[in-house]
Amino acid sequence: MPIFLLIRHGENDFVKQGRLPGHLSGIHLNERGREQAAALAKSLQGQPIRAIYASPLERAIETAGPLARALDQTVQLCPALLDTNVGDWQGVQLKDLHKLPLWKQVQKHPAEVRFPGGESFLELQERLVEEIEALRLMHKQKDMLAVVFHCDPIKLVLAHYIGLPLDNFQKLGVATGSVSILMLGKTGGQLAALNLRPPFTF
């Protein structure tokens, strides 16, 4: 079964400031994020990674870059791996969103939530799983793939494959610059590791 290294991009100032980035472009890794990307490359450069895929947002591309250079590979961009389309909440600080009734529903019953002007968590999960399945079918059993994208999308992919109800997906921890390992076969998935942070060895 293909082995997916699901990598959350490194830290950026939106993360530090507690702001929802959504699909905003122009958000780059900060100094710590660049350090995280370099540490990921160092920990993973000895692994037999067959391909590197990433969300087309800068924070994901910049995280994938050092690993691609270490492995002498190119980063293949996948629009379906984009971060959550949070619509009208894009760029808004979490401290302001906490005051809204819909935010409480986001935390307690996300399966029922659609972001104002954006997508629902169910739609987000469906597009992500469709993309992961497409990548699975493109590769051979035991191929190792690095997939660099975003926090909630990674949690939703993991939730789907381990059978965790969507309403509970936020109970998973996925830190910036972390790797979660998902092994996929025809009959489902197996979570081999969650939220690994460099330095680590397999």
Image (spheres, helix red, strand yellow):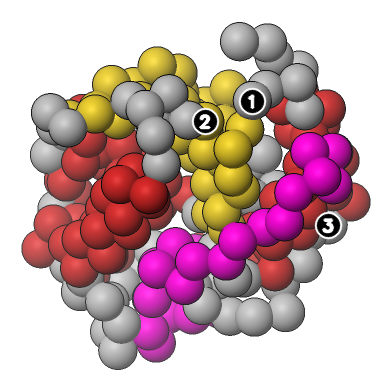
Q: Quadrant of residue 130?
A: bottom left
Which is more foreground, mark 3 or mark 1? 1
Q: Can you give x and y, in whole percent of width and height, for residue 38 in the image? A: 85, 38
Determine the CA span between mark 3 and mark 1.
Answer: 29 Å
What number is the disc on residue 48?
1
Lateral position of residue 192 relative to residue 47, left or right:
left
Residue shown at the point (30%, 72%) measured from the top left: 100
Of 15 and 79, the residue lying toward us? 79
Say what amino acid the circle numbered 3 marks: Asn
- Mark 3 residue crowding within 10 angstroms, few (<14) / some (14–19) / many (20+): some
Q: Can you give x and y, in whole percent of width and height, for residue 172 in the image? A: 36, 32
Q: Can you give x and y, in whole percent of width and height, for residue 95 in the image? A: 50, 64
Which is more foreground, mark 2 or mark 3? 2
Residue shown at the point (57%, 66%) measured from the top left: 77
Lateral position of residue 13 relative to residue 1, left or right:
right
What number is the disc on residue 40?
none
